Image (cartoon, rainbow, N blue to C red):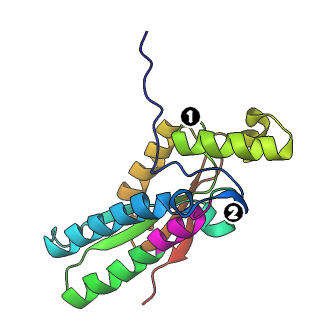
Amino acid sequence: MRTAPTPSFGATPSMERLDQMSWEDFSVTWNTDVKGALYWIQAALNLPMGPGGRILLSSSGAALNGSPMSGGYAGAKRMVWHMAAYANGISEQKGLGILFQAVVPTQMIGGTGVGDAGSTAYAHARGVSQEAFLASFGAPMPPRLFGEHVANILVDPQYATTLALGVKGDSAITKLQERSA
């Protein structure tokens, strides 16, 4: 019997302590997630799409709080956030009228490659079950709810100019950083 693949929101980092990682393990999210965001941004700025377009980039709550067991993951996800701000500056310089935004899940998302790897490793380190660790974030945010939050970001005008938006299962969408003028 075939099973459906586990969805993932980017590269799944190696879940080890910093002193036990190779550079290849440490940099996997830089070489996948940051590289993908760079190409996505470049295409949007150089093709470009029409004025009023919005580009969403996937970051992580690790960009806010760190992630000591996942190597370069937190730094890579913070870089994606920075890249959204840099791209907004270029859009303004070119007069494109395109907005770049970072979507930041502020909890681990069970049922995904990254969320399952992270929650398993952190639960083990704390001596609790994976379920108990995920419950520590509050209401779960399954992939479908994440998708609903993203759709709401795109249609609700209150989010139309925010640089970084946090999404969570029990508090929905929060503005983490407004765009600089």
Q: Which mark is residue 18?
A: 2
Q: Nearer the viewer, residue 68 or 9?
A: 68
- The x and y percentages for residue 62 are 62, 62
Identify the image quadrant of the C terminus: bottom left
Q: Residue drawn 74% across and 47% down?
A: 122
- In what element is the residue under mark 1? loop
* Residue 7, visible in the rendered structure: yes
Picture residue at 47% right of the left edge, 51% below the top: 11
121 to 76, vertically: above or below: above
Amino acid at circle 2: Leu
Q: Residue under circle 1? A: 111
Q: Residues within 10 Å of mark 1 (few under 14, many from 20)?
A: some
Q: Position of residue 37 (x, y in %)?
A: 36, 64
Cα gap from disc 2 to disc 1, whole angstroms: 25 Å
Quarter-wise, where is residue 17 in the image? bottom right
Task: Give whichever of discs 2 and 1 has the lower sequence position.
Answer: 2
Provide the residue span drawn in magenta: 71-81
Counting every numbered tag in the picture gives 2
Residue 44 location in percent, x, y? 22, 69
Query: Against 174, is 51 above or below?
Result: below
**Can you give x and y, in whole percent of width and height, for residue 126 in the image?**
84, 46
Q: Residue furthest right?
A: 127
Decide: is 175 above or below 130: below
User: Which numbered disc covers residue 10?
Assistant: none
Say if residue 68 shows up in the picture.
Answer: no
SS at mark 2 in the image:
helix
Question: Neighbour class for label 2 at 10 Å: few (<14), some, many (≥20)?
Answer: some
Side of 124 where 148 appears, left or right:
left
Q: Which of the two residues, 144 or 120, is positioned nearer the viewer here?
A: 120
User: Which is more foreground, mark 2 or mark 1?
Assistant: 2
**Residue 113 part of the magenta-drawn span:** no
